[in-house]
DNA sequence: CATGAATGAGAGTTCATTCAT
DNA sequence: AATGAATGAACTCTCATTCAT
């Protein structure tokens, strides 16, 4: 029944809000039930355990992210534009889940501790997809002579790491700066770092401009 | 008494090992006591609560790190060499605590959730020091014309974020690659990105070489 | 639901019995649960803490007492008869709770120590009602010339104190004498002490008789 | 060694203060030690257990009281004067221990609960002495025709009970009235109640005066 | 499907008491 | 005699999960 799926989503939504506010361990199943306006037992009609509910949330979000990503990249063939789309997708996703951001840190921590290997597995699968997409894209850029010759897996991994690092920065600083500009800044540094001579010439002025702007201060008019 | 401090360190050491293996929440105080070879009550002679013990660990480690950092940088005046030292210090520290690495993720997660604001405060203080050191160093490099003109706080923040991102990558990938080479790779990308024309010329060959090597594959003989 | 209130009463009843036998501090919540035939957690479904349960008992009993008192006095208008009713109400109440008697001492002790001011407050409210009722009644007796002129608040307070004193005597002597006769004896002494000349004449023979009888020995057939 | 006894007294004194402030159960042995300026272990050099220390306090105080009582009564032969001395002794004793008053309630409660029968035994021995002294005195008063014929044990028990009741009143009311005047008031009521016709005539004016004064309000000029 | 009362294993913490120094 | 670190039994309270209604 569609009704069942609707209610499941309602519970996931409620859980996300309470987890985000209180953290996984400080959240009681009763809190989630109350926040969703149902009885405690009802939660167990939809999720076998509290951890299962937590996992469902991770899975739900990563699925959404993955779907968006694949869809967006499919609509564009220019690899430089695709690189932008990749960045935009991350920003959009995180912005939508800004209020839930701290939960991601808990997913990571949980993945490394839980006996339930699914968390780690799911996160690695997600990273695998990112690496795969990034690899295709980067390979293309190298092949076309836009990027310098570079060890592609390493560069892609680094890029993913940087994304996570920026996200961490953003969360720990209480989301004090616009995530989007931080990503642009990152792209500028990376760009100047790995663009080939030819490509560099074309973009240098714009990228240097971004470097000077940074992402922490208000942009001048 | 010196004896008291020795025992405190023993307990911290035991706690670190058990926390690293089981995670903060899955660790019972009794586990730590048993692992340290003392009775449960003894733990409470040295730390008022389990959370206090957890905090003491964070504080201990960050203090060590900070001391090392300041000491190392004080012994060197060339900013380019100092940049290397900064990187090395991080690598050395993390390598020494490789087995405890997952705990850092929990510190971060905990800092965002706990009512005990000390966690967040301590982490921010640590980041503050890193930013301060990085800022001095980068400002010098820009002043000397080694770096392009750039918004220094943003660049330094990005660098810190990248470090965390690499660390995260390393932890989530089960420490499958040498952390040191990842940092070198990062420096190469950043270097090519922000070095001024003059400086670039000098270092370009070497940095490009690093780009091609990457950090994920075994180095050829 | 009525069921909830029933179970609450069941738990209060069980708690009263265990507290009476073992004392508040020597009683574990588990004891109460076992005695009531429920699980430990169930106790906490009805009372937030052990102390809350203790307070609920005090409140329950004083409420019962107060209700009875007011009801009884309302059914009688002659102040001399009302004085008897007051005495009877106390006797009936204590007799019904004879097995719980030691708990009252703990209520008093607890009221003076606990950070939870409700105990002291509740006991004072109860005493306030007794004083109020006693004051009305005594004022009437003085006004009618049955009692000598006397400082009414002092006399009423003394009477209340004597009641508690007799109760204490009874409890510490292991309830070796009939509480009722002790109250009658008290009334006789007080009566001879504060009755006006006129009233005294009328009742003197009877009261003197009571004085000779006392309350500690078996009455002669 | 006298030194040992001195230190024992020091500890008893410290214990009394802490017990009075916090109550027996909320007081930790460490609190007493700290308050006495010694180490925790030292307390155990003088008292085998915490309960033993508590008992020692009760014993100490009752011994003092008993000694004073016997001594005072021995210095006076007129039974009416002796009755006054008895009352004064109680007042003096309680006034000296005003700050410790709440502990007495705990002694009583403890006596009824503890497995250590010594508490109840000791309190009963004390009461026994009071009854004995009171009985001799009252018997004399009856024999001399000063008191009406009365069941002596009952009257003496009642008097003791009243004393406790007044004490309770005083403690629960936060010692708001002068204990001494309450005892005088009590004596006046009792006196008018049990004095023989002849004795009554002589004292009636004075006693009635006391009745009108009460003990709760400030005495006029 | 939904409920929420009932469960009980389990965790953190306390503190009287011991004992090596 | 004095100390205070160490002990570990004991206790309160929590909360994920179950299940009768």
Image (tube, coloured by chain):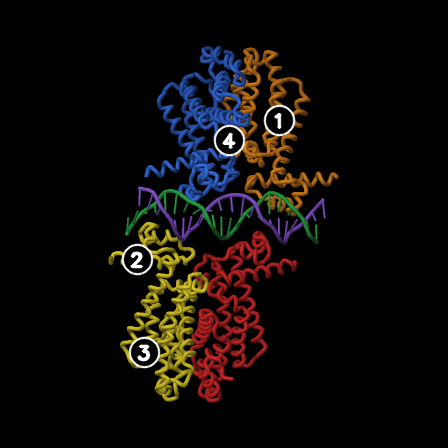
Chain colours: A yellow, B red, C blue, D orange, E green, F purple
Label 3 belongs to which residue?
A: A82
Is B74 rendered above or below residue C7? below
Q: Secondary structure at mark 1?
A: helix
Residue D154, quarter of picture: top right
Location of residue B85 by image quarter? bottom right
* Labels 1 and 3 share a subunit: no
Q: CA distance from mark 2 to mark 4?
A: 55 Å
* Residue A162, percent from left and from top: 42, 74
Marks 4/1: CA distance? 20 Å
Give the structural element (helix, strand or loop) at label 2. Answer: helix
Q: Mark 1, mark 3: which one is toward the viewer?
A: 3
Residue B112 shown left or right of residue D104 in the figure: left
Q: Nearer the viewer, residue D102 or B60?
A: B60
Task: Determine if marks 4 and 3 fall on one subunit.
Answer: no
Q: Does residue C118 appear in the picture of this structure?
A: no
* Residue appearing at x 35%, y 74% in the figure: A87
Across and down, in percent, residue B129 comes to: 51, 70
Q: Closer to the observer: label 2 or label 1? A: 2
CA distance separating discs 2 and 1: 73 Å
The reply to whether discs 2 and 4 touch (Cβ–Cβ < 8 Å) is no
Q: Earlier in the sequence, mark 2 or mark 3?
A: 2
In the image, which disc is placed on residue A8? 2
Could you tell me if the residues under marks 2 and 3 are in contact, i.e. CB atoms within 8 Å? no
Say whether residue B87 is left or right of residue D37: left
* Labels 2, 4: front one: 2
> Which residue is tagged 1?
D125
Which chain letter matches label 4?
Answer: C
Q: Which residue is mark 4?
A: C102
């Amino acid at each position: 029944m569609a009704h069942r799926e609707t209610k499941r989503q309602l519970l996931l939504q409620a859980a996300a809000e309470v987890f985000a506010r209180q953290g996984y361990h400080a959240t009681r199943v009763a809190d989630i039930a109350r926040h969703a306006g149902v009885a405690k037992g009802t939660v167990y009609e939809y999720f076998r355990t509290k951890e299962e509910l937590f996992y469902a949330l991770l899975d739900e979000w990563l699925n959404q992210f993955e779907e968006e990503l694949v869809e967006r990249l499919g609509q564009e063939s220019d690899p430089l534009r695709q690189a932008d789309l990749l960045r935009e997708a991350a920003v959009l996703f995180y912005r939508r889940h800004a209020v839930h951001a701290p939960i991601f840190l808990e997913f990571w921590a949980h993945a490394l501790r839980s006996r339930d290997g699914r968390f780690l597995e799911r996160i690695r699968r997600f990273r695998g997809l990112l690496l795969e997409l990034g690899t295709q894209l980067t390979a293309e850029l190298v092949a076309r002579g836009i990027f310098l010759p570079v060890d592609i897996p390493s560069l892609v991994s680094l890029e993913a790491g940087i994304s996570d690092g920026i996200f961490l920065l953003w969360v720990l600083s209480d989301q004090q700066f616009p995530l989007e500009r931080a990503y642009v800044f990152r792209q500028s540094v990376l760009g100047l770092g790995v663009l080939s001579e030819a490509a560099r010439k074309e973009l240098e002025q714009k990228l240097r401009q971004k470097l000077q702007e940074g992402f922490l201060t208000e942009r001048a008019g």
